[in-house]
Image (cartoon, coloured by chain):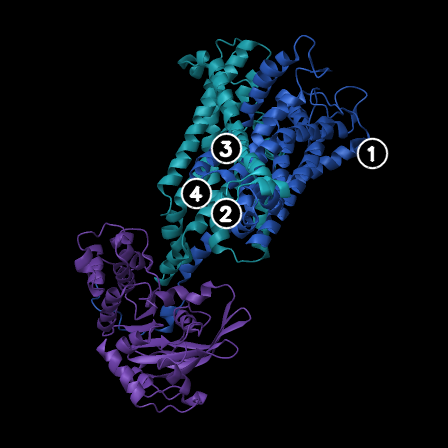
């Protein structure tokens, strides 16, 4: 049954020819795999199409000027007004305040992990820190409202409900921003640490050779050299804050408000979108369409932030790899 | 400076003066920086403690098996746990073939050209799209246009699209870890490309792909905003039996209880958070174990 | 080893090379039937030309060595014989590569069919991270051959002189074997698909001297039934095992070209080209 010696017969041209069935089989598999890959392309096309077609109908009802030049966002009560800036201000508000907390802490953590920590310490600490990114944001939202605002900020404000003389409202940007800061801490720390770890050794050694201390090497040599990576980390963190919904919807309030104060109740773009999603806005109403108009602005913002981060990361790789 | 230098005994190399000050600052900085690194962890532990403190007393078999209720002490997670299991199972079923197929095509079959670069760039950008955008995509396309309603199927399709980019990117990474000598060995024996992938690349990359999938599913398990957008914020007092059913999930239930003003519902939320976090930590632990177990020597 | 010393002495004794051979005289045709005929073969990676107009014939059931300094295109040439270079996206070639008179690069020829007839063993042993038996069975299985697993595994392992070492641990991973054993497993794996030709790309470069000698003995045994083409940077190895030797070198434009092809004895003792002589007497490379 089995040949005991290798093939003796010289092959004919037919032997080397493609087996049609096997070839077809292989092609079909390849086609199926390629079809899988188109899903992601179709998703993008669908997102863009849905956002912009609904937005286009929205702008038949609401003028461009009202959307971009009015400052009041009041879609539910007469007189209705769709000025996006109050929502944008809400988003910018939480971006600023979350960065105020997360940036110094995140950078310090990145410097510690990259320049100070023993490799074993880093191997343990880094995943633990990254675990913060795996906590569902609704959980952070719960903490922001109950623990941060209710148990800490309000008692801190005391009788007159004020911090530094300003009245704090129950739903406020500060509580949300503190939890957003925890949420983006791993993004800033981990990506900055990667960038710093990629700074060539000889740069550090040169600085040590000139008598610099560890802290000076870290802050004056490594950090500037890794700057584009750090900026990329910050852009990605901002994109996460801009896109985050649950924390701001639960803890920051639902009052469109043109303010950067951390103590007032505000509403972000995502907060508004969730509010509409909770109600049952009928298709074709201006409420339903405003959802997509705000979504489109949100999409463009996060896309720009992500692309900016990618460009910086690529530039960083070009320089050092 | 000159005076200081003269004052230092030349026989020692001990730092003095400005150098000593700089060194002291630098040494001190270690503890400040370590402190900053541990802040996140400390916050996590503190919040964990607060949650357990708040919710522990509410945890019981009844809490897991009761339907939601107007009365906080009778309300439970039954329908939201079932809904979570249904929607995640369907998401896994949908995401596995598409994610692995995409990753294989990109790494093993696709011609190295502009189209591939576009697909890659597109994936990177999709991974950064906020989940609420996936939510309104699901609302417009699956719930309204395809008329699936706020069903488990619509939820799973939405979550699948949401986790696809991160799963594909991590799977590609796993596939790249398979050494090219294995691929050459297989092809040199007269295997077709698919046979090579099927028998060697996929088995080699499987631990990495499973890790990626578990992490993605754990993210989907905590997703709230996208599911609220497609209509999962609803009162369900029956057991799901089909993918066309309306549904709710544990995170949506947590949201529901968190926004109630009554303290008793907050406790329910804390208890539900314990349940959700145990599930998510278990998934993360499983992913970590798989990764360590199959780590290449 | 002694043979090498003899060869080296002889080389010193009678050097008769002329300066540079004209292209038409660089090859002496083998007396045996050729199984592979290389005709005016050039290979490119993108704009870079890796091989320049190579022509010679590889005789059936003999060992042919491809030698030359690194970068001379000997591995490229080897990988063109079973179309492994098709996997490099920028690869392109001109000229013909005939196998039993059939052009391997003809449009209707399937590279997969080519590879199951022309097996390959690589520089670094690359057993699959599976059991020894599964390593052997993979080729025949994907090629749709009918076989009895136990018989097939035993025969392939015996042919590769590995049976006695591993017969009790066929279910163990191939990666648990020593480097030399791994390489013999790779040879056994290639033999299991019953190829006619086995290409070996510096198969001993990652092995110690003892393992190297074992593989060389094995090659001599296999040459009774198989055609073997081996790329080696080790001239002594070529002198020890090869019946025929092709010497390649880099041209000034960095493309590899065939300098001389002939019986090993002749190439090593009476090189006809000055460059071959310089190379084998160690004056460069």
| x, y percent for residue C214 | 23, 67
Residue, disc 4: B209
The one of A181 and C218 positioned closer to us in this rendering: A181
* Mark 1 nearby-residue class (10 Å; few <14, some 14–19, many ≥20): few
CA gap between label 2 and label 3 equals 30 Å
Q: Chain of mark 3?
A: A
CA gap between label 2 and label 4 equals 12 Å
CA gap between label 4 and label 3 equals 23 Å
CB of mark 2 within 8 Å of CB of mark 4? no
Colour of chain B, in one word, is: cyan
* Mark 4 nearby-residue class (10 Å; few <14, some 14–19, many ≥20): many
Residue, disc 3: A129
> Quick check: can you spot residue B99?
yes
The one of C285 and B153 positioned closer to us in this rendering: C285
Specify whether disc 4 shares its chain with disc 3: no
Between disc 4 and disc 1, the foreground one is 4
With B156 as the anchor, is C135 left or right in this view? left
| x, y percent for residue C96 | 44, 77
Residue, disc 2: B102
Colour of chain A, in one word, is: blue
| x, y percent for residue A154 | 63, 13
Is B227 rendered above or below residue C224?
A: above
CB of mark 3 within 8 Å of CB of mark 1? no
* Mark 3 nearby-residue class (10 Å; few <14, some 14–19, many ≥20): many
Between disc 2 and disc 4, the foreground one is 4
Colour of chain C, in one word, is: purple
CA gap between label 3 and label 1 equals 45 Å
User: For numbered disc 1, what is the local secondary structure?
Assistant: helix
Q: Which of pointers 3 and 1 lies earlier in the amino acid sequence?
A: 1
Please tell me in which quadrant of the rendered image residue B265 appears.
Answer: top right
């Amino acid at each position: 049954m089995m040949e005991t010696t290798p093939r003796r017969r010289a092959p004919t041209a037919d032997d080397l020819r493609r087996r049609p069935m096997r070839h077809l089989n292989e092609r079909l598999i390849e086609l199926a795999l390629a079809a899988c890959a188109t899903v992601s392309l179709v998703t993008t096309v669908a997102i863009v199409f849905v956002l912009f077609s609904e937005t286009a109908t929205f702008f038949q009802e609401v003028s461009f000027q009202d959307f971009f030049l009015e400052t009041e966002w009041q879609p539910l009560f007469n007189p209705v007004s769709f000025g996006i800036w109050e929502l944008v201000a809400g988003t910018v508000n939480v971006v600023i305040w979350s960065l105020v907390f997360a940036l110094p802490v995140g950078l310090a953590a990145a410097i510690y992990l990259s320049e100070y920590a023993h490799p074993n310490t880093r191997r343990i600490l880094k995943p633990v820190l990254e675990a913060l990114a795996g906590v569902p944001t609704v959980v952070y939202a719960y903490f922001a409202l109950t623990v941060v605002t209710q148990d800490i900020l309000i008692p801190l404000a005391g009788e007159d409900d004020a911090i530094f003389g300003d009245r704090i409202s129950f739903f406020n940007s500060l509580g949300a921003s503190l939890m957003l800061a925890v949420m983006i801490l791993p993004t800033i720390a981990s990506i900055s640490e990667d960038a710093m770890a990629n700074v060539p050794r000889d740069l550090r050694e040169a600085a040590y050779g000139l008598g610099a201390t560890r802290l000076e090497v870290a802050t004056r040599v490594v950090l500037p050299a890794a700057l584009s990576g750090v900026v990329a980390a910050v852009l990605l963190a901002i994109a996460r804050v801009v896109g985050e919904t649950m924390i701001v919807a639960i803890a920051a309030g639902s009052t469109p408000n043109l303010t950067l104060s951390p103590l007032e109740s505000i509403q972000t773009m995502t907060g508004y979108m969730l509010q509409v999603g909770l109600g049952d806005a009928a298709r074709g109403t201006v409420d339903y369409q405003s959802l997509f108009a705000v979504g489109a602005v949100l999409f463009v913002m996060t896309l720009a932030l992500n692309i900016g981060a990618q460009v910086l990361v690529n530039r960083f790789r070009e320089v050092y790899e | 400076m000159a005076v200081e230098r003269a004052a230092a005994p030349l026989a020692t190399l001990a730092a003095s003066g400005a150098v000593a000050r700089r060194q002291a600052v630098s040494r001190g900085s270690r503890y400040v920086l370590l402190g900053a690194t541990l802040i996140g962890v400390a916050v996590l532990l503190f919040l964990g403690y607060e949650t357990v403190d708040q919710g522990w007393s509410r945890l019981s078999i009844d809490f897991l098996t009761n339907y939601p209720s107007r009365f906080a002490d009778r309300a439970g997670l039954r329908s939201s746990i079932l809904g979570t299991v249904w929607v995640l199972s369907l998401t896994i079923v949908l995401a596995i073939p598409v994610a692995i197929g995409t990753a294989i095509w990109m790494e093993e079959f696709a011609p190295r050209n502009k189209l591939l670069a576009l697909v890659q760039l597109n994936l990177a950008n999709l991974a950064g799209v906020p989940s609420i955008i996936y939510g309104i995509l699901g609302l417009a396309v699956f719930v309204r246009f395809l008329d699936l309603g706020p069903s488990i199927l619509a939820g799973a399709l939405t979550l699948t699209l949401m986790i696809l980019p991160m799963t594909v990117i991590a799977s590609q990474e796993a596939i790249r870890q398979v050494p090219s000598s294995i691929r050459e060995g297989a092809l040199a024996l007269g295997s077709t490309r698919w046979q090579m992938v099927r028998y060697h690349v996929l088995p080699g990359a499987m631990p990495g792909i499973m890790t990626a999938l578990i992490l993605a599913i754990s993210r989907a398990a905590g997703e709230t905003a996208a599911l609220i957008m497609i209509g999962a914020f609803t009162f369900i007092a029956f057991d799901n039996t089909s993918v066309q059913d309306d549904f709710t999930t544990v995170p949506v239930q947590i949201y529901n209880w968190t926004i109630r003003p009554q303290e008793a519902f907050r406790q329910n939320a804390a208890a539900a958070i314990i349940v959700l976090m145990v599930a998510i930590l278990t998934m993360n632990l499983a992913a970590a174990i798989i990764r360590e177990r199959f780590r290449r020597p | 080893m002694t043979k090498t010393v003899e060869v080296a002495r002889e080389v010193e004794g009678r050097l008769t090379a002329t300066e540079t051979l004209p292209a038409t005289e660089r090859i002496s045709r083998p007396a045996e039937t050729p199984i592979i005929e290389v005709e005016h073969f050039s290979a490119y990676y993108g704009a870079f030309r890796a091989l320049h107009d190579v022509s010679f014939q590889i005789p059936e059931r003999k060992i042919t060595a491809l030698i030359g300094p690194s970068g001379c295109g000997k591995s490229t040439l080897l990988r063109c014989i079973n179309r492994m270079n098709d996997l490099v996206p920028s690869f392109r070639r001109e000229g013909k590569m005939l196998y039993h008179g059939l052009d391997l690069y003809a449009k209707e020829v399937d590279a997969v069919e080519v590879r199951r007839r022309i097996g390959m063993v690589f520089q670094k042993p690359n057993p699959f991270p599976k059991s020894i038996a599964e390593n052997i069975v993979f080729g025949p299985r994907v090629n749709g051959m009918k076989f009895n697993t136990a018989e097939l595994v035993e025969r392939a392992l015996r042919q590769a002189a590995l049976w006695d070492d591993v017969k009790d641990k066929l279910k163990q991973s191939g990666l648990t074997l020593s480097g030399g054993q791994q390489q013999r497993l790779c040879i056994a794996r290639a033999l299991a698909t019953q190829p006619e030709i086995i290409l070996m790309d510096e198969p001993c470069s990652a092995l110690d001297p003892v393992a190297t000698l074992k593989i060389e003995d094995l090659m001599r045994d296999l040459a009774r039934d198989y055609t073997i083409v081996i790329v080696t940077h080790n001239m002594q190895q070529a002198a020890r095992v090869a019946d025929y030797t092709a010497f390649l070198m880099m041209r000034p434009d960095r493309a590899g070209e065939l300098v001389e092809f002939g019986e090993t004895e002749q190439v090593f003792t009476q090189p006809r080209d000055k460059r071959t002589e310089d190379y084998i007497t160690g004056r460069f490379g």
